[in-house]
Amino acid sequence: MTYRTVLIAALLALSAPQPGRTAGAAPDLAEVAGRYRITGASTIGFAVDQIGGGGIRGRFGQFAGTFNLKSGDLSHSVVSFELKPQSVSTGQGRIDNFLRSPAVFDSSEFETISFRSSSVQKTGTDTARISGTLTAKGHSGPEVFDVKLTSWNGGKIAFNVSGRILRSRYAMDVGTPIYSNVVQFDMMIEGQRN
């Protein structure tokens, strides 16, 4: 689901120091432009709160994504991301199986959850917001994620991505209101320039 945010990191890199540069001296667009892929060093974590405390915490182990930052024209940059809901892991086999079942992800019928960006808005010197369309379990909806740049070295970008998605939008709201309708995402994403 979240996935989607790599472009923002590249946009944020426009204002981040690069090796050999002084702080505050941003690389130009030509330096950060190009195609990047999300690496396996990334982590896609999520949480669903429960009334009275506890809840479900987990991550997805299989995902892939790219972003293409267009030199001279950020409006034509594209982020795409997909994850495999079958790869969900909470550390509890019974909960993992339930999440994979037709009641939640229905991962045997819907093998991927995908995101494609539609816009990026810089919100600070090292933060941005990315909007796009998330598709899960045969349903699509608009989603927004906040991104904070954590590092940029010319070939690799790393950032934290957070967002909140309503489960009901994707026919996954089983267990509400005992379990929150809101899924909170906390992702650490690393991108490698191709």
Image: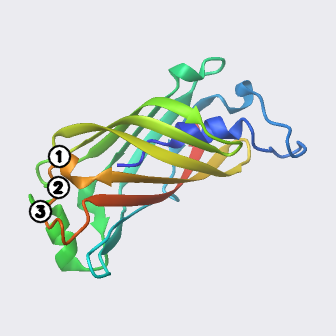
The local secondary structure at tag 3 comes to: loop
Relative to 59, say whether 90 is above or below: below
Question: Cβ–Cβ below 8 Å for labels 2 and 1?
Answer: yes
Q: Which mark is residue 172?
A: 2
Q: Quadrant of residue 184?
A: bottom left
Number of the label disc, if any, that sits on residue 101: 3
Q: Residue at 38% across / 53% down in the picture?
A: 164
Name the residue rendered at 25%, 56% in the picture: 85
**Label 2 vs label 3, nearer the camera:** 2
Circle 1 residues within 10 Å: few <14, some 14–19, many ≥20: many
Pointer 1 or 3: first along the chain: 3
The answer to whether 74 appears left or right of 181 in the picture is right
At label 2, which amino acid type do we have?
Met
Up/down of 159 relative to 93, above or below: above
- Residue 92 is situated, as x and y percent measured from the top left of the image, at 25, 80
Camera-side residue: 110 or 22? 22
Q: Of 45 and 131, which appears nearest the observer?
A: 131
Whichever of labels 2 and 1 marks the residue nearer the N terminus, that label is 1
Per the rendering, the mark at residue 137 is 1
Residue under the image location 19 percent in, 65 percent down: 99
- At numbered mark 1, what does the secondary structure look like: helix, strand or loop? loop
